[in-house]
């Protein structure tokens, strides 16, 4: 590293620390009693010290001064990963399935509750991944389909007494229809215009739910939604039992999450998935190659809405109450952040993104006041260090220029 480049890096580092202080101080120093600098300086000093250590290590690594540690560590990691690579995929899937099945028997109520939340967001993230990651359509109103699924089951359960399992496909179908209705006039747009219009439609759905008093009970929401029921052997007879405990609900959402993962995986590696990727890479070229881009984009919108509707149906059954406050733009932004953080188009990446944004904040609940600040910092660091996400999607094939051909 040249001296000039080193000076630029140090100057950028110093500017970053000053910028961080000017963001941190209003959060911690402006209080009704007056202005304080002590708490912000204390937190800033800790962060600055940690950042300085990481920055120095990064500089030493770039200069090759840490090769005496890095090279043996890389060899050790390769030797440890070698046995995992030779394991068949079914063995890894079986191990993960066994851990998921045993989870509610080995953990307390709080951990099960967090796991249920994670799997709800996995369903939502994978649904949005079809639209954003595979088809390349930026959707900022995705949470509207979550709301459609939740209200569909709530209304059918409260007014008609229909069961959860019967309402599950109905909620998915209603969400798909809503996706087509919203998608048809908007998918002729591209880029930022599409994002703004979908954001508007998402808000329209929430406002309709909030103001249609005769149907949705407005901001008061709908109470008395029935939980799922399953057949259970009791005293030698099969009876329908309501799943009111968290362990039972855990297995219901685990089933929905597994179905979602398999369905999205099958879609991803189908001809439709290839067409979606072609549209994402270059819509004009895909259209010239004979791909019906409008129909496939509408299909992506509808398929993404299906999984949002399934998650919404479970949400209503779990909470036994729905209201418009559960389907705000922040929820759409959170699901989109999971897809971007994990890796657009990647199923394991979306699962990791959901774990990172739902489970980790629970681990660091003591720092709840600074959670959004940390979230913004992590997203900024991700853009620099891993711009394609925690687990980027594997690309099928490659461009001719990438293979070195003219």
Image (spheres, rainbow, N blue to C red):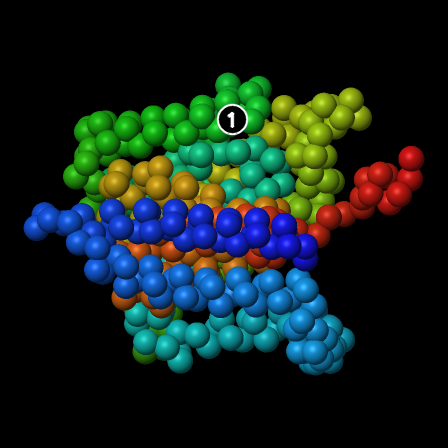
> Taking 128 as reference, is 110 left or right?
left
Q: Residue at x 15, y 49 (%)?
A: 35
Task: Tell me if residue 166 comes above or below residue 43 in the rendering.
Answer: above
The one nearer the camera, 307 or 234, is: 307
**Quarter holding the N terminus?**
bottom right
Q: Looking at the picture, tell me which residue is in the foreground, 379 or 309.
A: 379
Look at the image and tell me whether residue 184 can be seen: no
Q: Residue furthest right?
A: 406
Residue 354 appears at what percent x and percent y?
Answer: 46, 56
Where, by quadrant of the figure, is residue 283 drawn?
Answer: top right
Residue, far left: 33
Is 231 in front, or is 366? Answer: 366
Does 280 sit left or right of 48 as displayed?
right
Q: Residues within 10 Å of mark 1 (few under 14, many from 20)?
A: few
- Return the residue at label 1: 192
Residue 169 percent coordinates (x, y): 46, 44
């Amino acid at each position: 590293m040249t001296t000039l480049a080193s000076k630029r890096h140090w100057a950028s580092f110093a500017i970053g620390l000053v910028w961080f202080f000017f963001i941190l101080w209003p959060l911690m120093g402006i209080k009704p009693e007056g202005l304080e600098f002590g708490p912000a300086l204390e937190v800033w000093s800790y962060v600055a010290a940690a950042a300085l250590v990481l920055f120095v290590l990064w500089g030493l690594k770039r200069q090759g001064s840490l090769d005496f540690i890095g090279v043996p560590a890389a060899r050790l990691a390769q030797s440890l990963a070698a046995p995992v690579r030779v394991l068949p995929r079914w063995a890894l899937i079986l191990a993960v399935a066994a851990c998921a099945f045993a989870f509610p028997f080995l953990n307390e109520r709080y951990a099960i509750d967090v796991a249920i939340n994670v799997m709800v967001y996995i369903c939502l993230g994978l649904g949005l991944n079809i639209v954003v990651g595979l088809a390349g359509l930026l959707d900022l109103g995705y949470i509207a389909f979550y709301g459609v699924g939740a209200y569909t089951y709530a209304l059918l359960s409260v007014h008609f007494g229909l069961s959860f399992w019967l309402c599950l496909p109905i909620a998915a179908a209603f969400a798909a229809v809503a996706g087509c209705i919203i998608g048809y006039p908007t998918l002729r747009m591209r880029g930022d215009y599409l994002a703004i219009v979908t954001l508007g439609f998402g808000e329209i759905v929430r406002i309709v739910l909030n103001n249609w008093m005769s149907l949705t009970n407005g901001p008061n929401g709908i109470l008395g939604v029935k939980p799922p029921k399953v057949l259970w052997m009791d005293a030698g007879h099969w009876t329908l039992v309501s799943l009111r405990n968290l362990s039972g609900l855990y297995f219901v959402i685990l089933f929905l999450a597994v179905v979602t993962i398999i369905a999205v995986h099958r879609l991803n590696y189908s001809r439709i998935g290839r067409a979606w990727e072609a549209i994402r890479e270059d819509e004009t070229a895909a259209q010239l190659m004979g791909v019906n881009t409008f129909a496939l984009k509408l299909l992506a919108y509808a398929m993404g809405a299906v999984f949002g509707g399934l998650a919404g149906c479970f949400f209503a059954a779990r909470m036994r109450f729905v209201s418009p406050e559960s389907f705000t733009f922040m929820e759409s932004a959170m699901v989109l952040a999971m897809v971007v953080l994990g890796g657009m188009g990647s199923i394991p990446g979306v699962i990791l993104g959901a774990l990172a944004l739902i489970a980790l904040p629970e681990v660091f609940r003591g720092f709840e006041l600074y959670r959004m600040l940390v979230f913004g910092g992590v997203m900024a660091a991700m853009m620099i260090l891993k711009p394609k996400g925690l687990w980027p999607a594997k690309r099928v094939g490659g461009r001719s220029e990438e293979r070195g051909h003219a």
